[in-house]
Amino acid sequence: MSQSFDTVVAAGSAVGEGEGATATKVVSSLSRKMAQPGGLSIAQIERRSNERLLGHKAEAMKAIERSVSELEVLANEDLQDSAALYGVAGNVLSVAGFFDTGPLYDAVYSLCETIEAMNARNAWRNEAVHVHVQAIRLILKDNCLLTPNSERLMQGLKAIQAHAKGE
């Protein structure tokens, strides 16, 4: 609940108000609580928030693992309609974006871009999808760490993506 109180404006302190005018200042319950001694600092709130977010990372990585397994199944099919593949990849991308997944995020993003490019040019190649999904699996096995191996994988995926775009 908000509480208001009146203050008297001093000369030159309020634009458009003359000296001696009364202004009303609204104080919210949140600002009162934050002003009380013993409250949390912004740094403490941020730290707690990050800790809670990281508490969900293990479950999120399990969900990503399941989705990558689904990508592997879809990649082994002769896809005429890439919507299902793109949908699963997009879900992985969304979850990976919340956490520090480094090359995993980049590899899945590359897969999405490659799918879009192949669809736009009507030049579908299952091999491009297979390579992306295999690279995503390898990156997952390396705990999404940026390693010399993941850097080489990403170079290869960028080349595939460029080829899909016709570059």
Image (cartoon, helix red, strand yellow):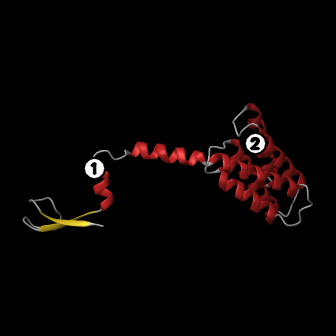
Q: State the residue at coordinates (76%, 49%).
A: 65
Tell me whether circle 1 and circle 2 mark residues in contact (CB < 8 Å).
Answer: no
Q: Is residue 13 among what the camera can see?
A: yes
In the picture as drawn, the residue positioned furthest to the front comes out as 38
Which circle, 1 or 2, is nearer the viewer?
1
In the picture as drawn, the residue positioned furthest to the right comes out as 78
Q: Is residue 17 among what the camera can see?
A: no
Q: State the residue at coordinates (92%, 60%).
A: 78
Q: What residue type is labelled 2?
A: Leu
Q: What element carries label 1?
A: loop
Residue where numbered disc 2 is placed: 140
Q: Residue 161 carries which label?
A: none
The mark nearer the N terminus, 1 or 2, is: 1
Q: Residue 36 carries which label?
A: 1
Query: In the displayed structure, does residue 101 sit left or right of residue 20?
Result: right
Q: What residue type is labelled 1?
A: Gln
Residue 44: where, in percent of width, then height? 42, 43
Gap in Å between the C-alphas at discs 1 and 2?
A: 46 Å
Q: Residue 10, relative to residue 59: is it above or below?
A: below
Of 161 and 150, which appears nearest the observer?
Answer: 150
Circle 1 Cα neighbour tier, 10 Å, few/some/many (<14 / 14–19 / ≥20): few
Q: For the image shown, how many numbered marks are present on the structure? A: 2
Residue 108: where, in percent of width, then height? 73, 50
Query: In the displayed structure, does residue 47 sit left or right of residue 7?
Result: right
